[in-house]
Image (cartoon, rainbow, N blue to C red):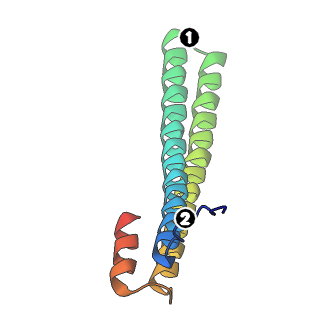
Amino acid sequence: MTTIDQHPKPTAYEFLLARYRDVYKVAASIVQLGQIIKLIAFLVVAVAIVAAIRIIAEQSGFETGLSLGLAIFGALAGAALFGLGVMMSACGQLLRALVDTSVNTSPLLIPEEKGAILSAG
């Protein structure tokens, strides 16, 4: 007689916990990526300003205008990157809020299970 491997079926709670845990990880990764982009933005601005100051300190004339252009370009590039980082972090936060709402309104979970999933995320 052949026996069939019988694995216990995961409960709705276990299934949803695994699913929501994965989504929370993705949301956290998106938020972290936004934070990294914002850090890179600050570094771009800092490098551009330091380079502009060094050019001004060493030369005058045409190089002064070049350094001013470099500082302005660095500030604009940094501002654009910072804005991108803010938007990226906001997308991760929105994903978290969406999952929180999904967990909170799930008819498959009792309040204690909802609380456990929300605290795990």
Q: Which amino acid type corresponds to the residue marked 1 in the rendered image?
A: Gln
| 80 in relation to 67, above or below | below
Q: Is residue 6 left or right of residue 105?
A: right
Say which residue label 1 marks.
59
Q: Residue at x 56, y 39 (%)?
A: 75
Q: Residue furthest bottom?
A: 107
Quote the CA–CA distance across marks 2 and 1.
76 Å
Residue 73 on image: x %, y %: 64, 35
Q: Quadrant of the C terminus?
A: bottom left
Q: Earlier in the sequence, mark 2 or mark 1?
A: 2
Q: Secondary structure at mark 1?
A: loop
Residue 98 on image: x %, y %: 54, 75
| 118 in relation to 81, above or below | below
Kindly identify which numbered label has been placed on residue 7: 2
Residue 118 sits in which quadrant? bottom left
| 70 in relation to 20, above or below | above
Contact flag, marks 2 and 1 (Cβ < 8 Å)? no
Q: Quadrant of the N terminus?
A: bottom right
